[in-house]
Image (tube, rainbow, N blue to C red):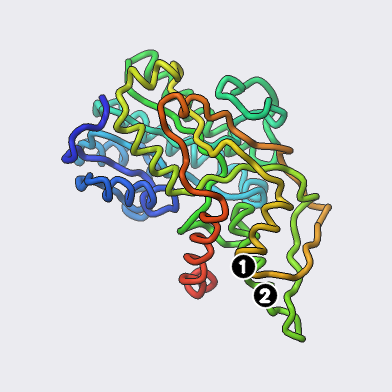
Amino acid sequence: MHLTNSDAKIYVAGHRGMVGAAIWDELEAAGYQNLVGRSSAELDLRDPQATRAFFEAEEPDFVVLAAARVGGILANDRYPADFIGDNLAIEQSVIRAAHETSVERLIFLGSTCIYPKRADQPMPEESLLTGPLEPTNQWYAVAKIAGHKLCQAMHEQHGDDMLTLMPTNLYGPGDDFDLETSHVLPALLRKAHEAKGARPDGSDGPVTLWGSGEPRREFLYVEDLADAVRFLLETPEEEIREVAADGMLNVGVGEDLSINELMALIQEVVGHEGPVEHDRSKPDGTPRKLVDTSRMDALGWTADTSLRAGIEKTYNWYREHEEELIAA
């Protein structure tokens, strides 16, 4: 069943996070007012009994599973048990509760880090499980692979309408700017901002990049992902299964750039003119991550926001919230 009724109840799991908040705003702007969400303090999605009780009480028609424990290379390396354990628990609780309460459609949000480290570029959905994972995010990747496979199994065994979206690297308002846990784009944006005028003479200080800066990455503005989620909620299942029999669809922009090129673009937006240094003792991660978007292309969806425009919007948001972000 696809979304046709503006009164349908839609549960956005993780609605306080960057991705969930963008999806909530997108659905609300499109006229869907019957939205439900719970903070992690109100509902621990790792608890299957509490999750099932919530589903029985609220009876959502549609579910978007955007709740997850997320972070960059450093966080993945430091908290491997949390990254695999918490995400597996969340997925199991929500997907099973959705099945048991006959939810009409569930969309599970994965990540393109699920693909092998040496996958063909751009990475098609068919490359899943064809090679070893990137070690620096393997814990998160294994959990997301399991979540997709659980959705696929529910469809094959029970006929449940469960889909998996695999977005490329996301960024935007509400991002994590903590240098201990953030991904590369918000981390570099904050570093460039803080380096402006940082030297005693008022000139711009250096920004340090991890590794060589040569790995290539693709970046998707979070509001574009939210638009893709709404688009798929409104698309009939038979149309989706024609291009994605396994229910899995990459979401990206179809082009990438090196981390060095990203840094240069961020410097332009921020107005940072200081030197860029490389800490080659730190890992590069996967050499390249560009997704094949042919399945979404076939359905008629493409991203709208250019990388420069998205960085500008994100930087404006960061400056507006800088004090509270630093205090946190």
Residue 264 location, quadrant: bottom right
223 vs 207, left or right, is left
Q: Which residue is mark 2?
A: 196
Q: CB atoms at circles 2 and 1 under 8 Å apart?
A: yes
Q: Which residue is mark 1?
A: 270
Residue at 38% of width from left, 33% of height from top? 107
30 vs 83, left or right, is left
Name the residue nearer the viewer: 49 or 118.
Answer: 118
State the image coordinates of residue 142 (x, y, percent, origin top left): 58, 32
Secondary element at tag 1: helix
Figure quadrant of the N terminus:
top left
Rendered view: 290 above or below 246: below
In this rendering, the label closer to the viewer, 2 or 1:
1
Residue at 55% of width from left, 39% of height from top? 168
**Callout 1 environment at 10 Å: few (<14), some (14 to 19), or many (20+)?**
some
Q: Disc 2 versus disc 1: distance between alpha carbons?
A: 8 Å
Rendered view: 74 above or below 300: below
Q: Amino acid at mark 2?
A: Lys
Name the residue nearer the viewer: 2 or 296.
Answer: 296
Residue at 67% of width from left, 45% of height from top? 257
State the image coordinates of residue 250 (x, y, percent, origin top left): 51, 31
Residue at 37% of width from left, 31% of height from top? 95
Secondary element at tag 2: loop
